[in-house]
Image (spheres, rainbow, N blue to C red):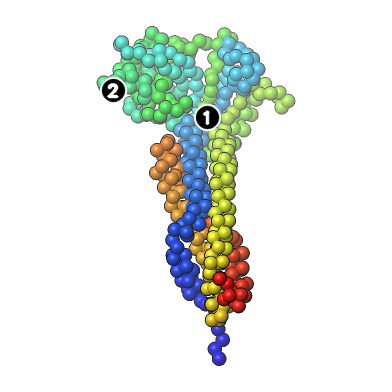
Amino acid sequence: MTRRHGLGPFQVLGMAWRSLSGNVMRSVLTTLGIIIGVAAVVALTAVGAGVNAGVQQSITNLGTNLLTVGGAFGGGGGGGGGLVRGGPRQSVTLADAVAIRDAGWESVSAVAPVVQSNAQLKNGSLNVNATVVGTWPEFGAVRNTEPEQGTLFSQADVDARNRVAVLGYTVASELFPTGSAVGGTVKIAGVTYTVLGVLPDKGAGGNSMNSSVLIPLSTYLQRVGRPSAVGEPTVQSVYVQARSADDLKGAQALIEELLDLRHGMGPQKDRDYQVQNQGDVLASFSEVTGTLTLFLASIAGISLLVGGIGIMNIMLVSVTERTREIGVRKALGAKPRDILSQFLVESLLLAVGGGLLGIGFGLLLAFVVLPRFGLSAVATPGAMLAAFGFSAAVGVFFGFYPARRAAALDPVDALRYE
């Protein structure tokens, strides 16, 4: 007599598929919670990654491997360049920028101090309000703002206090609407400047240079800005570019050591300046957006549990509806593990099918629907795999009880069931 070993895996899979395909609408409705949950997780994580990438790109557009030296917040701020109480003190001087540049550190590749104020620019009858920025030629490299047309001014222009300017994209468009601005002239505070170049379009963000005009720092101090009442002129910021991201921390430590010495800052004294590290800013934004995305995805994941409960309910109903079928199969020799396997595979197929449909709908939502509302998305394979794996686990977990209940039915009682 041949010993029966039960159904093979392909036989179990085929029986489960035939059972589910016999009522397609109920199967789809059963998986609706799984579909919604997986789609929400995929879409939210993709949008969260897109937001994070957008924020990082915006920060990187300000400059690569950037350190920003400026006055510390709070206090009154001394000297002629002080701001209102509670704002940043203009305690960093042009001499500080020169000292950083002349230190010759290998970890620092470029330095660019900045002073700025608003002024009206004119070209004939056309005029526009713009931010006039006095700086050094290294500003273009440090802040990723090399001219799209023409060139930036040179160190010779700074040394000679030449009246030359580089216009932001919007400024150039408004003052020279019909032709190239390069080679033309504009008036800043009543003084004529020759236009050397035009910066590329950086969008309308708050840190965009579109509405700015760059001029040599020495020219700015002579013709636009008001010099400090006493001593060396102050600057609002000193941008320092490290040679690589790995050099940011080291360069920051060297700058702080130098400025502590120059400003007479002791270990127990609050510094009158601050150094902002671009790497720290990027890490902070990434942590915040990552936490927010995880929180939203976790909330969306709750619907996966709800979908699992829905699968369990339908499988219990299916066990009740197919009680006589189970009794007949057991009477013909089906083992409890055969019944358990079939119902467990049915539950798993529902969850896996719902997971695949959810991934499809999530990608459609993230890359087709949400971009119409101004949201960008970045594909996150890890999140998709996690959501799919979780949906499969939900199918197994919530399908086990109905499957075990079906396997435990007494064949005699099952055959008598009406």
Instruction: Give the x, y percent position of residue 392.
Output: 54, 59
The numbered disc on residue 180 is: 2
Q: Residues within 10 Å of mark 2 (few under 14, many from 20)?
A: some
345 to 47, vertically: above or below: below
> Is 260 or 335 nearer to us in this picture?
335
Query: Of the residues under marks 1 and 2, which one precedes in the sequence?
Result: 2
Instruction: Give the x, y percent position of residue 272.
Output: 64, 21
The residue to which callout 1 is attached is: 240
Tell me what residue is drawn at x 49 percent, y 33 percent.
59
Tell me what residue is drawn at x 55 percent, y 11 percent.
228
Instruction: Give the x, y percent position of residue 258.
Output: 62, 27
Instruction: Give the x, y percent position of residue 149.
Output: 33, 27
- Amino acid beneath label 2: Ser
In the visual, does 235 lie left or right of 216?
right
> Is 351 or 250 nearer to us in this picture?
351
Name the outermost residue toward the front. 418
Name the outermost residue toward the bottom. 1
Q: Which label lies toward us, 1 or 2?
A: 2
Res. 382 in view: no
Tell me the quadrant of the picture where the N terminus can be found.
bottom right
State the separation of the CA atoms marked 1 and 2.
32 Å
In the visual, does 150 lie left or right of 40?
left
Q: Secondary structure at mark 1?
A: strand
Name the outermost residue toward the right. 268
